[in-house]
């Protein structure tokens, strides 16, 4: 935004300091003059002008001295105000420089303003925190975009290779080709829909309404029950009514992703998944646990990154597209919640989603 040039804050503060100092000097001199006049006679006798104290003599000697004092106060106020304003505004200059660097794309710079806590240092610390979060967010978005481009390029490259083979080999089995193209195309569609879902959740472009997480947990487990039976996994659900506010579609997607991941990454033929909901003072929780191989804490901290699955990136035809927990994390943050991944001592993972409790609209005290 273009603005017309104006006086700097330092100059305004300098003039303010000098003005207040001049005003204080004038008031002080006026007070001295008024109180002196009460005790000085008004004797207009030129013969005794320089012999007896009177107002005319006092005025003749006091006025020049008062003018000198006021001139000194003006000069002192301007110089001192300019110096003090510069000292006080020095932190603001550093903050402004950091802001300009951030506007030019440099997010690694930090102000790190030394000294005791005051308004400027609170502003600098808040700005440093914002820069750190923004830098991490931009890095995550760049990493996500690079991974998404790579993942989308893979099915397209496979499709192109299949079509090239079919064009050069007229005896190629058309049915097999169509089946493989269908599988590759389905994976590409699933990946695109997942990316759109992440984008929608990040923008928080959804209507909020009252939702019961326990009902969503039941719906998700019933939907995924055939998958669990196919993998020999038992699902156990329990919990209380857990009201929260948000998008039912997104929260159902969150619950489905958690239960699906718990089924897929489990012990083959003898695994168990526990789905539970609970309510606390100000939050509700959804917890999904599963049996499985032991997960290192360092690995658990990376599982919410996009296209991350287990110890490897999702480049195979294994179930999922590597965005399950990334979608869960995005939906959780969009609903002002927290996501916690904790390795179980006996193997497997415990995933807890904590969301704000829905306000009580029943009217009960």
Image: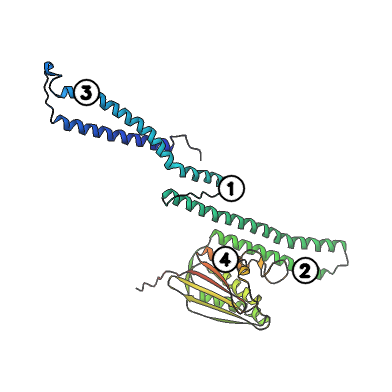
Residue plotted at (87% across, 61% down): 168
Q: Seen from this angle, which residue lies furthest top? A: 47
Up-down relation of residue 170 to residue 267 (above or below): above
Say which element carries label 4. helix
- Above or below, 117 against 66 in this view is below
State the quadrant of the C terminus.
bottom left
Q: Is residue 133 above or below residue 78?
A: below
- For the residue pair 357 and 89, the one nearer the viewer reads as 89
- The CA span between labels 4 and 1 is 27 Å
Residue at the farthest front position = 51
Q: Residues within 10 Å of mark 3 (few under 14, many from 20)?
A: few
| Residue occupying the point 63% across, 62% down | 195
> Closer to the N terminus: mark 1 or mark 2?
1
- The mark found on residue 221 in the picture is none
> Within 10 Å of the Cα at label 1, are there few (<14), some (14-19), or many (20+) other Cα atoms?
some
From the top left corner, tell me how far across and down residue 54 is, in percent. Answer: 14, 24
Q: Are marks 1 and 3 in contact (CB under 8 Å)?
A: no
Name which of mark 3 and mark 2 comes first in the sequence.
3
Q: Determine which residue is flagged by label 4.
A: 329
Q: Mark 2 sits on what residue? A: 180
Q: Which mark is residue 106?
A: 1
């Amino acid at each position: 935004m273009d603005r017309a040039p104006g006086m700097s804050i330092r100059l305004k503060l300098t003039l303010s300091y000098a003005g207040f100092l001049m005003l204080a000097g004038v008031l002080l001199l006026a007070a001295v003059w008024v109180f002196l006049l009460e005790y000085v006679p008004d004797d207009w006798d030129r013969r005794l002008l320089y012999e007896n104290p009177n107002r005319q003599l006092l005025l003749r000697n006091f006025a020049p001295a008062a003018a000198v004092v006021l001139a000194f106060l003006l000069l002192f106020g301007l110089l001192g105000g300019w110096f003090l304003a510069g000292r006080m505004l020095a932190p603001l200059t550093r903050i402004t420089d950091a802001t300009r660097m951030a506007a030019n794309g440099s997010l690694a710079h930090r102000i790190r303003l030394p000294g005791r806590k005051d308004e400027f240092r609170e502003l600098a610390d808040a700005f440093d925190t914002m820069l750190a979060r923004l830098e991490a967010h931009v890095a995550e978005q760049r990493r996500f975009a690079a991974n998404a481009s790579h993942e989308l390029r893979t099915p397209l490259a496979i499709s192109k290779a299949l079509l090239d083979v079919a064009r050069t080999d007229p005896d190629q089995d058309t049915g097999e080709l169509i089946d493989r193209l269908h599988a590759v195309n389905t994976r590409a569609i699933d990946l695109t829909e997942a990316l759109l879902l992440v984008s929608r959740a990040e923008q928080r472009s959804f209507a909020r309404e009252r939702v019961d997480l326990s009902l969503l947990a039941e719906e998700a487990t019933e939907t995924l029950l055939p998958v669990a039976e196919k993998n020999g996994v038992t699902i156990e659900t329990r919990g209380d009514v857990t009201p929260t506010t948000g998008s039912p579609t997104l929260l159902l997607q969150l619950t489905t992703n958690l239960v699906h991941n718990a089924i897929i990454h489990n012990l083959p033929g003898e695994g168990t998944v526990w789905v539970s909901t609970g309510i606390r003072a100000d939050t509700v929780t959804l917890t999904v646990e599963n049996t499985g191989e032991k997960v290192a804490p360092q690995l658990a901290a990376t599982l919410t990154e996009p296209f991350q699955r287990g110890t490897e990136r999702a480049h195979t035809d294994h179930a999922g597209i590597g965005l399950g927990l990334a979608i869960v994390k995005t939906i959780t943050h969009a609903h002002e919640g927290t996501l916690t991944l904790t390795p179980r001592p006996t193997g497997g993972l415990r995933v807890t989603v904590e969301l704000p409790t829905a306000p009580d609209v029943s009217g009960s005290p």
